[in-house]
Image (spheres, grey):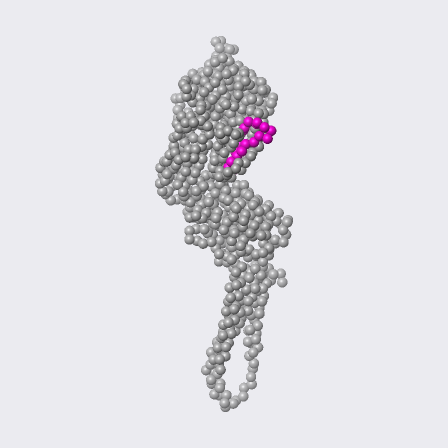
């Protein structure tokens, strides 16, 4: 009888065994057949007249008896169907999700990527997904268990162990909020595997399992289903559960998004005209209507620009603005509303300085003067760059923190304390530019600044020794690095003809992170840059002035004539720009990336307070002490917008951090459902489109219709039996 049990379980009824009562429908037929008796015929004159009358009404009587028989059979069949509690649905996916005789474990996986915020009227895809999940809960049976996973990056298990009270699960679904990032399919499948394994160990009575995915089938998420890793996971899941997919997406969705917002100049100072560039991209196949882009400065509307974007193309919009006060500022650009509002706005944090302060440390008199002249040749009250020339003792005597960048020019050697001061300066996001020369002692540089003695590395490369005397030319390496990129298509700037006769051979400490910006024609690095700690370290292999001489030759040979070449000032400024940029590089990140910073340690329990967008109170983040400073990391950046970081009690101690959405998710192109693995059942969808109501299942109510029909047939059978009897009489 195993086959009968399996057959009953596969039928779409809550209590399939009750269908066996349908066999009672054979009783009226059996009684009808048994009631037919055989008579012996005897001729009788009076019967001839009676038989003649019966022949005239025989067909009518047979039809009446057959009709009563069918009604009585239908009454018993309807009774059996009502007892079996049918769970049929016009939407097979919902029906199959509920169609289990055993107690079922439902794993609800709701797509939380921000493409799910795409709206039709006031309702988003995420709203539709939550309503479908809630509807499935309402139509479930007592004893079913539910777990809940939000498909995000990373995925979030909201209910890890099966919950048996639908009201509790509905409350958690109602509290779900869309994420401002993407969704990782592979990680979500791994999370579901873990949930299923845990449920099998703790809830063995849940013999059936259904994994229900509520998603818009966005290509950026579901393209991963084609990978071998995902297909293997889906295969393992299909062996443990039925996989159901509820498609809440829409085809041909159009979207405009702000995909980038940048400050063209990295040195933002007071009263200088700055250029703010926004990039807007169109995702779709129809020509977008003309629009406008609005610039906000410190939360106030400042400028508006017209916008025209080609089909599936990009458009750049430029704004210019002057900041009249130094300190923390932020800007934002906004588009007009469209179906996906989350990517219509982008923020940018801009720390504005009174001037860029640079400490030029020289190893001998005059070694830094050419660098200082290149940094700021003008003299006046409002300097953009303020160079301060000091000897190497300033590394220990001066407060390095107010300086945005430090230039070390032909300094002979360093002590342990000086190396630690420079290491701490980089840790706080400072910029360091090191130029060499005839005073440099390579062993001291390698031991102290290379980290051999203390383990705290400051330089991006090791000094191997001077190259032999010769004339060397520079190679810009196709102008790939940001320092030399502005020289592209400006061959007459003098960079390629810069004369160099002597330099130190350099070997990068870490070839994966150190970048060679400029090389010599023989392949040796001439300029190396690396991000160390939170700062930027740049090393020039030769001198930055004419005072470095090779005195082994007669007459003494200068190391280089770079300081007198026209390419020197722009090269120094590009090095300064990159070095200073490191201080604000972590101010503008994407959703999911951590915020990082440093602050002065004023107490053993020192901390900073981070306030997320839309929150009234901040979160206290402790400092990890390193020397006199402390580092902090804040990872809860799931929401786009401006984050305020307070490191002290004053207004000057508040810093703005901008967290923006990744524009990858702005592409609403859908994954081809035909390419989904065969293990997915996707009978429902897409839903949530204009004019398309959500499916009404309410499968537990079908038995009422059958009972109502049964009652009606009983009344009909009674009436017909009375009517036919009287008519025959």
Q: Residue at x 50, y 39 (%)?
A: 615
Q: Is residue 254 visible?
A: yes
- Residue farthest along the front direction in this orientation: 649
Q: Residue at x 64, y 49 (%)?
A: 201
Relative side of 412 to 300, left or right:
right
Q: Residue at x 49, y 75 (%)?
A: 720
Q: Position of residue 53 (x, y in %)?
A: 47, 84
Q: Quadrant of residue 104?
A: bottom right
- Above or below residue 200? Residue 270 is above
Query: Can residue 602 be found in the magenta stretch?
Result: yes
- Residue farthest along the top direction in this orientation: 554
Q: Position of residue 323 (x, y in %)?
A: 41, 28
Quadrant in which the N terminus appears: bottom right
Query: Can residue 532 be found in the magenta stretch?
Result: no
Q: Which span is picked out in magenta?
A: 592-612
Residue 482 or 372: which is nearer the viewer?
372
Q: Position of residue 10 (x, y in %)?
A: 57, 59
Q: Quadrant of residue 316?
A: top left
């Amino acid at each position: 009888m195993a086959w009968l049990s399996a057959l009953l379980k596969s039928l779409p009824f809550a209590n399939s065994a009750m269908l066996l009562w349908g066999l009672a429908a054979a009783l009226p037929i059996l009684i009808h057949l048994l009631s037919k008796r055989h008579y012996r015929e005897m001729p009788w004159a009076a019967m001839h007249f009676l038989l003649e009358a019966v022949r005239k009404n025989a067909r009518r009587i047979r039809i009446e008896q057959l009709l009563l028989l069918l009604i009585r059979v239908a009454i018993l069949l309807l009774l059996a169907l009502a007892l079996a509690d049918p769970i049929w649905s016009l939407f097979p996916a919902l029906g199959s999700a509920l169609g289990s005789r055993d107690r079922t474990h439902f794993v609800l996986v709701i797509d939380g990527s921000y493409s799910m915020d795409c709206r039709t009227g006031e309702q988003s895809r995420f709203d539709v997904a939550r309503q479908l999940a809630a509807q499935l809960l309402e139509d479930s049976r007592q004893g079913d268990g539910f777990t809940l996973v939000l498909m995000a990056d990373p995925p979030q298990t909201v209910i890890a162990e099966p919950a048996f009270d639908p009201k509790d699960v509905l409350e958690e679904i109602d509290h779900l909020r869309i994420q401002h990032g993407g969704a990782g399919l592979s990680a979500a499948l791994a999370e579901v595997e873990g949930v299923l394994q845990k449920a099998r160990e703790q809830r063995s009575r849940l013999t059936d399992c259904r994994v229900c995915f509520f998603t818009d089938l966005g290509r950026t998420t579901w393209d991963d289903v084609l990978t071998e890793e995902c297909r293997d996971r889906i295969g393992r899941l299909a062996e443990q559960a039925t996989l159901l997919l509820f498609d809440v997406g829409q085809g041909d969705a159009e979207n405009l998004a702000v995909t980038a917002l940048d400050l063209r100049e990295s040195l933002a100072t007071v009263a200088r005209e700055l250029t703010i560039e926004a990039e807007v991209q169109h995702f779709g196949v129809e020509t977008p209507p003309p629009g406008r882009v609005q610039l906000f400065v410190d939360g106030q509307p400042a400028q508006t620009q017209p916008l025209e974007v080609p089909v599936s193309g990009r458009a750049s919009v430029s704004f210019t603005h002057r900041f009249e006060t130094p300190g923390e500022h932020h800007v934002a650009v906004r588009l007009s509303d469209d179906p996906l509002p989350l990517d219509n706005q982008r923020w940018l944090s801009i720390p504005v300085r009174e001037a860029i302060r640079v400490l030029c440390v020289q190893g001998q008199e005059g070694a830094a003067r050419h660098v200082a002249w290149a940094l700021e040749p003008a003299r006046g009250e409002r300097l953009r760059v303020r160079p301060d020339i000091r000897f190497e003792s300033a590394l220990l005597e001066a407060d390095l923190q107010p300086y945005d960048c430090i230039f070390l020019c032909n300094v002979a050697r360093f002590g342990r304390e000086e190396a630690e001061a420079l290491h701490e300066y980089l840790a706080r996001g400072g910029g360091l530019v090191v130029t060499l020369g005839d005073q440099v002692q390579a062993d001291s540089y390698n031991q102290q600044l290379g980290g051999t003695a203390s383990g705290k590395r400051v330089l991006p490369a090791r000094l191997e020794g001077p190259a032999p005397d010769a004339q060397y030319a520079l190679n810009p390496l196709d102008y790939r690095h940001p320092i030399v990129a502005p020289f592209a298509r400006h061959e007459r700037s003098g960079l390629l003809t810069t004369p160099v006769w002597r330099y130190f051979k350099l070997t990068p400490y870490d070839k994966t992170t150190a970048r060679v910006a400029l090389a010599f024609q023989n392949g040796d690095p001439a300029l190396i840059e690396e991000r160390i700690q939170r700062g930027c370290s740049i090393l020039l292999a030769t001198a930055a002035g004419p005072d470095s001489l090779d005195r082994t030759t007669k007459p003494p040979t200068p190391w280089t004539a770079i300081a007198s070449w026209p390419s020197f000032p722009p090269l120094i400024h590009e090095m300064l720009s990159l070095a200073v940029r490191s201080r604000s590089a972590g101010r503008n990140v994407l959703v999911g990336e951590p915020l990082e910073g440093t602050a002065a340690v004023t107490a053993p329990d020192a901390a900073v307070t981070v306030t997320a967008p839309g929150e009234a109170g901040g979160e206290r983040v402790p400092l990890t002490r390193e020397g006199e400073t402390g580092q902090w990391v804040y990872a809860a950046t799931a929401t786009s917008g401006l984050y305020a970081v307070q490191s002290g009690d004053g207004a000057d101690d508040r810093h703005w951090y901008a967290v923006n959405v990744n524009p990858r998710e702005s592409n609403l192109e859908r994954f081809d459902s035909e390419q989904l693995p065969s293990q997915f059942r996707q009978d429902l969808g897409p839903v949530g489109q204009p004019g398309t109501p959500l499916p009404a299942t309410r499968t537990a109510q079908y038995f009422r219709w059958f009972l109502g029909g049964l009652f009606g047939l009983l009344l009909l059978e009674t009436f017909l039996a009375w009517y036919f009897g009287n008519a025959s009489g």
